[in-house]
Amino acid sequence: MSEIIKIEQLRRTFQVGSEEVHALRGVSFTIRAGEFVSIMGTSGSGKSTLLNIMGCLDRPTSGEYYIDGVAISQRSKDELSTLRNRKIGFVFQSYNLLPRTSALENVELPLLYNNSVSSKERRERAARALEQVGLQNRMMHFPNQLSGGQQQRVAIARALVNDPVIVLADEATGNLDTRTSYEIMSLFQQLNSEGKTIAFVTHEPDISAFTNRAIQLRDGNIVKDVPVETQSAKSKLAFSN
């Protein structure tokens, strides 16, 4: 399998007041095509570690970071922006949808930065992405007309619309109830079965159980990187009825 994310001895240090914080202490790992990886940490650290790893897209303190074979250290800021836009689909805990914009228009947003995509193609690709997440009947609805689970599906569609090499989900079930979390994880499992590579940050072991591999971080170090005996979110959802 090809390497989608490759991180080698990544270190990042920054100042918080008078304190020097070692956010990453020589972190190394690889995510290969087709994997569904959870990134976990102790409360308050897993998410910040992910943000620090992604923050290294703008330059790590030391170490090397590759996305789909491209070395980050050799790229300009403009090239890095294009790389993030074309190679990574982001899904956030708080959805990050524009409130006065329809689901379809929200999904179109990443394509606005791609001059090679016409307005007609942009609309068609956004519609297909919404169909992919089961929202073909909600395309013209605004966020306040959608449930939390539906809003997260819009966010997932937005992450898919550029056909990225990896979807990066940051606590994507954090604002959802248990049943809706199972629905969203079932969707992620479906996307993974169709070949999409996914990295999913969570503090919840029961959510990590829906992935194929778990990377656990503590104090800026990887303390565990193990395969997961994957559970079916669809089965959990059926049992919760």
Image (spheres, rainbow, N blue to C red):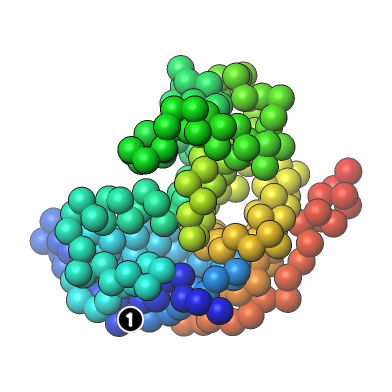
Q: Give percent across and percent down for residue 221.
A: 38, 78
Q: Is residue 120 left or right of residue 36?
A: left
* Quadrant of the snapshot with the N terminus: bottom right
**Residue displayed at 76% across by 56% down:** 233
Q: Give percent across and percent down for residue 165.
A: 49, 60
Q: Give percent across and percent down for residue 183.
A: 73, 46
Q: Residues within 10 Å of mark 1 (few under 14, many from 20)?
A: some
Q: Nearer the viewer, residue 134 or 99?
A: 134
* Quadrant of the snapshot with the C terminus: top right
**Residue underneath mark 1:** 8
**Residue displayed at 39% across by 76% down:** 6
Amino acid at pointer 1: Glu
Q: Give percent across and percent down for residue 9.
A: 30, 82
Q: Secondary structure at mark 1?
A: strand
Report whether residue 216 is seen. no
Q: Is residue 211 left or right of residue 82?
A: right
Occupied quadrant, residue 200? bottom right
The answer to whether residue 141 is above or below residue 46 is above
Q: Is residue 116 left or right of residue 205?
A: left
